[in-house]
Amino acid sequence: MSGRENILARIRAHAAAGEDEPARAARVEAHLGAHARGTVPARGQQDKAGRIALLRQILEGQSASVRELDALGAVPAEIADYLRRHNLAPRLGMGDDAALAGLDWGGANLELRHGRANAELESACSMAFAAVAESGTLVLTSGPDNPTSLNFMPDNHIIVLRADQVMGSYEDGWDALRAAFADGPPRTVNYVSGPSRTGDIEQTILLGAHGPRRLHVIIVK
Amino acid sequence: MHADTRHFRQAAGKALIDGQLQKALGNVKRGFIAKRAKARDALPEFDRLRDEARDIKIHTLAHLDLYLSRFEDKVKAAGGQVHWAETEAEAREAVLEICRAAGAKTVTKGKSMITEEIGLNAFLEQSELKVVETDLGEYLVQIRGETPSHIIAPAVHLNKEQIEHDFRERHKDLPPERQLSDPVQLVAEARQVLRQAFISADVGITGANFLIAETGQTVIVTNEGNGDLTQTLPKVHIVMASIEKAVPTLEDASTLIRVLARSATGQEISTYTTFSAGPRREGDPDGPQEFHVVLLDNGRSSVLGGPFQDMLRCIRCGACLNHCPIYQHVGGHAYGSVYPGPMGSVLTPLLQGVQEAAHLPYACTLCGRCEAVCPERIALPDMLRRWRARDFAAKPPLAGAKPALKLWAALAACPRAYQLVTGAAIRLLALLGGRKGRIGRLPLMGAWTKHRDLPAPQGQSFLAQWKAGRRK
Ligand code: SF4
């Protein structure tokens, strides 16, 4: 027998406690199919305005900055302004996200670099798949639209989010993801809940350990 | 596991008089405990979530074979490979083989306790691979040639002056006159040095907090983002996970995520939680070309169904370490095990054998704080007591212990004689205590009174006082 068979046989012998296999298998199928939710914290169960306010409050508490805009068209100017405020070059990395591609970046005097991140890239912009208000979390999905390396390599990460994508709970986020990706989840799903940090030196929290030192979130109505 | 757990007493004694260590351990008490309490208070549903987190694990462990098989199917469907390892050695070999096949020279690692358990770094280094830990705490420990002293804060035993010294020793190519006294400068230097490692690595190894059966996703939780750079940039990603990490669905994982960070660091959620399914897809501009999961048993499947099964519910949050009065005073290294503190004292004898780790279950006052904070509600003190009972039963009885216990039993069976003898003993002890009311040295009990005084009884037994009171 292979290691796999040995391990599975031992588990079966010890865990099943003599119960018959069809009953166990049926219980597992039922559990996997039900997607039953446990207790969902009440704090996220609010109307849209309440969810956005909670998301914003928690993110700001985690040293991210948040800006709310009325229209997607205003995003390039906001990013140009953000980079200027922080003394950063007007250069921005991004993927092929259709919503971002449709914006007038040239009008904001921003130079774009498409594709994955490299070591020189200082600032990047991604479109979030969703956000979860209960913990101040942005949900990003991998792919050519929004390469994963953009979330971690640059010093400055700017995430654009549509207000109607702000969910109350993780579970609402997973339902939305299942609906959008019928064949199973994308290669990577990233929860991002603030800029990178470490507490490894004397338990003092310091920002910018390996990932972005700054996280700026733009919520578009 | 290649730890030496037999010298707990000596190691603990040394730890208690180590000024540097005691200073660093102060941070555990000040930081983690207050932060967890704050996070718990901020979420009214927290205790209910702990019950549910426990129930999810109970259900999963009872069906672990089926959930692991489903997980494997899903990983394969996403283009990944699953390797099953019964022993530490098989797991190490599996990793080495993947590295060799990829022609790897450098390996970066995210934080993974399982790789500590199997001694992976030393093994890969013997095989001419360069291994770089990228979690800041793990990196600090690696360059010192030490092991982690805490399961979530590996370098909690270090102070910033020690780190500055180590960086100056290690990073010789950087200008010696640079400023490094501020932790901000230390973090910036680590970031700069490790960035090079991320970019040049051929293989990235991470652990996993959860394996999701429904989707075949592996999950890591970090604050630094090092795990993500480790798994996104190299051409091969290896996930090392032990079999009890499986959970059925994303909903179940959500419940566990809600209790994990709150119990560990007191955060609502860690900065980064990453769900990974398979290698780079068509059109993906980044991500690994190969995705491997090495599933480690190392004795766990035999723990199922037995008296220590509940230990497999552990989600490695570290709360039991932080709240343990012993851990707070001696730190993690004294235990001599990869897994220190209450969870380690239960787990180590399971992985290593009770002979090897016989001292550890005694490194406990049975105060119960660990169980009170455990997000999985694991009855750690009960299990420690069980280990002690086993150890006691296995040892040859202490000279004189058997007749003494027999005598005690005979006395206890005869109330009148019992009262007579204990009454006399109490009066004698009260006399010995004198006016101080404390006994500094007791014949036959030298070991007990060496470090503390025995408070002397007041002069009468409870029963005698009760009777006297009733007569009034
Ligand atoms: S035993 Fe409980 S408290 Fe200790 S690390 Fe495991 S889950 Fe956390």
Image (tube, coloured by chain):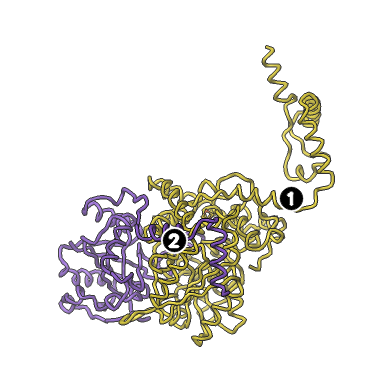
Q: Residue B281 is drawn in which quadrant? A: bottom left
Please give the name of the residue rendered at 37% of the width and 75% of the height, measured from the top-left corner. Answer: A153
Q: Residue B6, how many percent across, how many down?
A: 71, 60
- Foreground residue among B276 and B412: B412
- Would residue A61 be found to the left or right of residue A49 on screen? right
Quarter of the image where the C terminus of chain B is located: top right
Q: Residues within 10 Å of mark 2 (few under 14, many from 20)?
A: some
Q: Residues within 10 Å of mark 1 (few under 14, many from 20)?
A: few
State which chain disc 2 sits on: A
Q: Is residue B292 above or below residue B31?
A: below
Quarter of the image where the N terminus of chain B is located: bottom right
Q: Is residue B154 above or below residue B462?
A: below
Q: Residue B344 is drawn in which quadrant? A: bottom right
- Residue type (three-letter) at the residue carrying disc 2: Ala
State which chain disc 1 sits on: B
Q: Residue B142, how many percent across, how many down?
A: 57, 72
Do marks 1 and 2 share a chain? no
- Foreground residue among B316 and B268: B316
Residue labelled with disc 1: B393
Q: Residue A18, how many percent across, how many down?
A: 54, 56
- Would residue B20 be found to the left or right of residue B65 on screen? right
Please give the name of the residue rendered at 57% of the width and 63% of the height, measured from the top-left corner. Answer: B301
Residue labelled with disc 2: A25
- Write down the colour of chain B: yellow
Please give the name of the residue rendered at 25% of the width and 50% of the height, measured from the top-left corner. Answer: A46
- Residue type (three-letter) at the residue carrying disc 1: Ala
Q: CA distance from mark 1 to mark 2?
A: 40 Å
- Write down the colour of chain A: purple
Q: Residue A187, how many percent across, how many down?
A: 36, 74
